[in-house]
Image (cartoon, grey):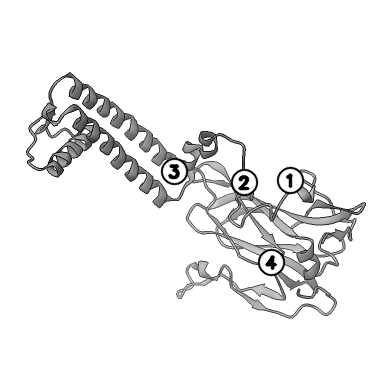
């Protein structure tokens, strides 16, 4: 159920790049991890896979599994070729059973692929020598590609930022504000950090539901450096698109708060970007975040408790606020 436009003082954001027709999109615009909620169809298999991008961005354990499977598969393929040519073309084999012969061929393939070449087994004849030289070339090229991918994975600029799971509607300066927070979780500290937030909400226009996007001005949207947690605050006043809307209203209109963070990482000497979103189910009414940092025992340094990122305490809303829970 879409809402009638309730606050015309709020400033619309026309630069989101997202569609306004509610019938043409399903679910939220962005996942919590910042990835667009978009399934792409109509692309050819290789274009859809985008192997380079996939290998560069997949989790570390998946990348290692792919490399190991590729190594085992290539050697299995070349071992099969040597067996097809004839094991009598591999001199120096010490094997009696078929499994031992296959093992000798497989590990000769592994030695050739890695250019180790112990020398006990060597190819005899043009066919086996040609396959061995082709495998050595394949191994050199494969190691070059894997080395480049590993360097790219380690050197790729990333914003190591974690966001709170919930956004809180909390008492603030005698009124109400919506708050969320973020924190760096490595030593890649950012400078010149800027945060932009946008509210996506469904509204009725001439009886037709439309997606509308409104800027959510933050009390503080820029910071010279980000070394500890940062709580972002949007004050809900008469100019806020959230003004006068209850939790039930936001649920019914499929409200979503989009968050975009940009900063300069001195370690990478590059600009990094991070994104997340909060939908109406992620809103908590009547709560305030707990402090995440405190002095150490000797009062000589500050301790940042990452485990407290999502910790909050319930607080009553001000009497002059009518933002009931759903």
The residue depicted at 21 percent of the width and 30 percent of the height is: 84
Residue position marked by numbered label 4 in the rendering = 281
**Which is nearer the N-term, disc 3 or disc 4?**
3
**Which is nearer the N-term, disc 2 or disc 1?**
1
- Tell me the CA gap for discs 2 and 3: 25 Å
Residue position marked by numbered label 1 in the rendering = 18
The residue depicted at 74 percent of the width and 80 percent of the height is: 316
Percent across and percent down for residue 40 are 62, 42
- Tell me the CA gap for discs 1 and 4: 21 Å
Residue position marked by numbered label 3 in the rendering = 153
- Tell me the CA gap for discs 2 and 4: 22 Å
Q: Are marks 2 and 3 in contact (CB under 8 Å)?
A: no
Dot 4 falls on a residue whose secondary structure is helix
Q: Are marks 2 and 4 in contact (CB under 8 Å)?
A: no
Residue position marked by numbered label 2 in the rendering = 39
Mark number for residue 160? none
Quarter of the view holding residue 256: bottom right
**Which is nearer the N-term, disc 2 or disc 3?**
2
Furthest residue in direction right, as rendered: 206
């Amino acid at each position: 159920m879409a809402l009638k436009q309730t606050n015309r003082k709020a400033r619309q954001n026309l630069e989101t790049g997202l569609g306004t027709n509610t019938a043409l999109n399903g679910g939220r615009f962005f996942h919590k991890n910042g990835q667009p909620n978009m399934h792409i169809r109509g692309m050819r298999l290789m274009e859809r896979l985008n192997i380079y991008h996939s290998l560069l961005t997949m989790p570390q354990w998946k990348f290692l599994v792919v490399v190991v499977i590729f190594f085992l598969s290539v050697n299995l393929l070349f071992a099969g070729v040597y067996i097809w040519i004839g094991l009598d073309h591999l001199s120096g084999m010490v094997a009696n059973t078929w499994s031992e012969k296959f093992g000798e061929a497989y590990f000769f393939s592994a030695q050739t692929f890695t250019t180790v070449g112990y020398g006990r087994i060597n190819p005899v004849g043009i066919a086996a020598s040609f396959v061995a030289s082709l495998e050595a070339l394949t191994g050199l090229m494969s190691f070059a590609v894997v080395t480049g991918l590993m360097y790219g994975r380690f050197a790729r600029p990333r914003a190591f930022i974690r966001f709170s799971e919930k956004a809180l509607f909390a008492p603030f300066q005698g009124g109400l504000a919506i708050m969320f927070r973020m924190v760096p979780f490595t030593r890649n500290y950012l400078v010149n950090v800027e945060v932009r937030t946008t509210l996506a909400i469904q509204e009725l226009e001439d009886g037709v539901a439309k997606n509308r996007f409104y800027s959510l001005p933050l009390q503080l949207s820029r910071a010279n450096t980000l070394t500890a947690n940062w709580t972002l605050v949007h004050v809900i006043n008469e100019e806020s698109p959230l003004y006068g809307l209850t939790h039930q209203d936001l649920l019914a209109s499929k409200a979503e708060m989009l968050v975009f963070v940009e900063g300069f990482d001195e370690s990478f000497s590059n600009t990094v970007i991070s994104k997340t979103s909060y939908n109406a189910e992620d809103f908590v009414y009547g709560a305030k975040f707990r402090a995440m940092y405190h002095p150490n025992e000797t009062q000589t340094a500050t301790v940042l408790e990452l485990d407290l990122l999502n910790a909050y305490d319930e607080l009553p809303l001000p009497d002059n606020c009518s933002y009931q829970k759903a």
